[in-house]
């Protein structure tokens, strides 16, 4: 198998996006099935945190893994 670090990094980025989407879906299901206000608030918090994760974590990882500029 190829030992290219870019493949592992790409898989990590995709994994983070999939995990965030799964969390958002879980939060939406929780909101939809809840009858009390407490679980609805929890579901909303889960959805918002999952969307924040989808938006920020891949970009932060890409910035961290970026090749340093050569002078």
Image (spheres, rainbow, N blue to C red):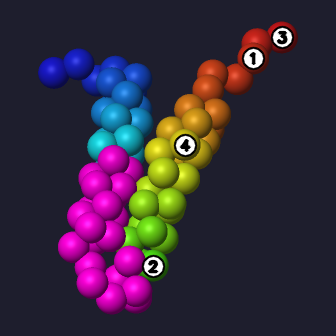
* Chain-order first, disc 2 or disc 4: 2
Instruction: Look at mark 1 in the image and give the residue it sits on.
Output: 69
Neighbor class of circle 2 (other Cα within 10 Å; few <14, some 14-19, many 20+) is some
* Chain-order first, disc 2 or disc 3: 2
Mark in front: 3 vs 4: 4
Residue for point 64% across, 34% down? 63
Residue for point 61% across, 26% down? 66
Instruction: Look at mark 2 in the image and give the residue it sits on.
Output: 41
Q: Is residue 68 above or below residue 54?
A: above
* Chain-order first, disc 4 or disc 1: 4
* Chain-order first, disc 3 or disc 4: 4
Instruction: Look at mark 3 in the image and give the residue it sits on.
Output: 71
Whether pointer 2 and pointer 3 mark residues with C-beta atoms closer than 8 Å, the reply is no
Count of picture labels? 4
Whether pointer 1 and pointer 3 mark residues with C-beta atoms closer than 8 Å, the reply is yes
Cα separation between marks 2 and 3: 51 Å
Q: Which mark is residue 55?
A: 4
**Whole-percent x and y of residue 29?**
24, 64
**Which range is magenta?**
20-40
Q: Which mark is residue 26?
A: none
The one of 56 and 11 positioned closer to us in this rendering: 56
Indicate whether residue 51 is drawn in magenta: no
Cα separation between marks 2 and 4: 21 Å
Considering every residue shown, the one lying at the far top of the view is 71
The one of 8 and 36 positioned closer to us in this rendering: 36
Neighbor class of circle 4 (other Cα within 10 Å; few <14, some 14-19, many 20+) is few
Report which quarter residue 18 is drawn in: top left
Whether pointer 3 and pointer 4 mark residues with C-beta atoms closer than 8 Å, the reply is no
Cα separation between marks 2 and 1: 45 Å
């Amino acid at each position: 198998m190829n030992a290219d670090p870019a493949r592992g990094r790409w898989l990590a980025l995709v994994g983070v996006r999939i995990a965030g989407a799964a969390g958002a879906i879980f939060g939406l299901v929780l909101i939809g099935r809840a009858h009390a206000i407490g679980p609805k608030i929890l579901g909303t918090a889960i959805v918002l945190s999952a969307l924040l994760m989808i938006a920020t974590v891949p970009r932060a990882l890409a910035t961290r893994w970026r090749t340093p500029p050569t002078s």
